[in-house]
Image: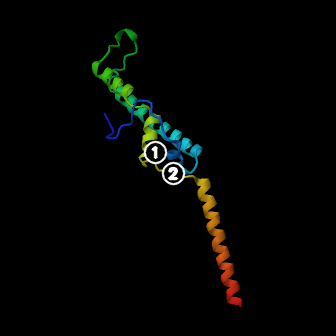
Amino acid sequence: METKKNRPINTTVTRDTAKFSDMTGNIYETVAVLSKRSNQIASDMKRELHRKIEEFSAGIDTMDEIYENREQIEVVRHYEQMPKPTLQATQEYLDGEIYYRNPAKEDQNMQRLEAMENEAIAESAVAEKQ
């Protein structure tokens, strides 16, 4: 079972919201990044859990023939005791392990750069004429 070295705390912790808006400049953008990352973590955990539980299924359809397997119970308990995906995403964000980008901001920055280049070209053309 995959365990991380730097596991997030499983208890309630008061966080400084200023730290969350430092990287993005906007607390709402940070919340969006954290929610997307926690959804990724949750879906990965779900796929991994289903893959491990499939190993125990014997293809039996009747409820009477299904028995409890000690290893299966241990696997499920392990996943129940893991920190919630939101806590993992928050810890990753605070540790700087999340890569994110905002295409809207990148487009605005590109437009600004192009405008500055066009101004520089125009200024150099005027300087050459004189």
Q: Which mark is residue 93?
A: 1
Question: As rendered, which of 31 and 67 lies closer to the eye?
Answer: 31
Name the residue carrying label 2: 23
Could you say whether the residue bearing mark 1 is in a helix, strand or loop?
Answer: helix
Q: Quadrant of residue 6?
A: top left
- Vertical arrangement, residue 31 with respect to residue 115, above or below: above
Q: Is residue 1 left or right of residue 39?
A: left
| In this picture, residue 56 sits left or right of residue 84 | left
The residue that appears at 54% across and 50% down in the rendered structure is 24
Residue 31 visible at all: yes
In screen coordinates, is 96 left or right of 120? Answer: left
Asked if one can make out residue 43 in the rendered structure from this viewpoint, the answer is no
Looking at the rendered image, the quarter that the C terminus falls into is bottom right
Q: Looking at numbered disc 2 in the image, what kind of residue is underneath it?
A: Met
Instruction: List the single residue furthest toward the top.
Output: 64
**Kind of residue sitting beneath label 1:** Tyr
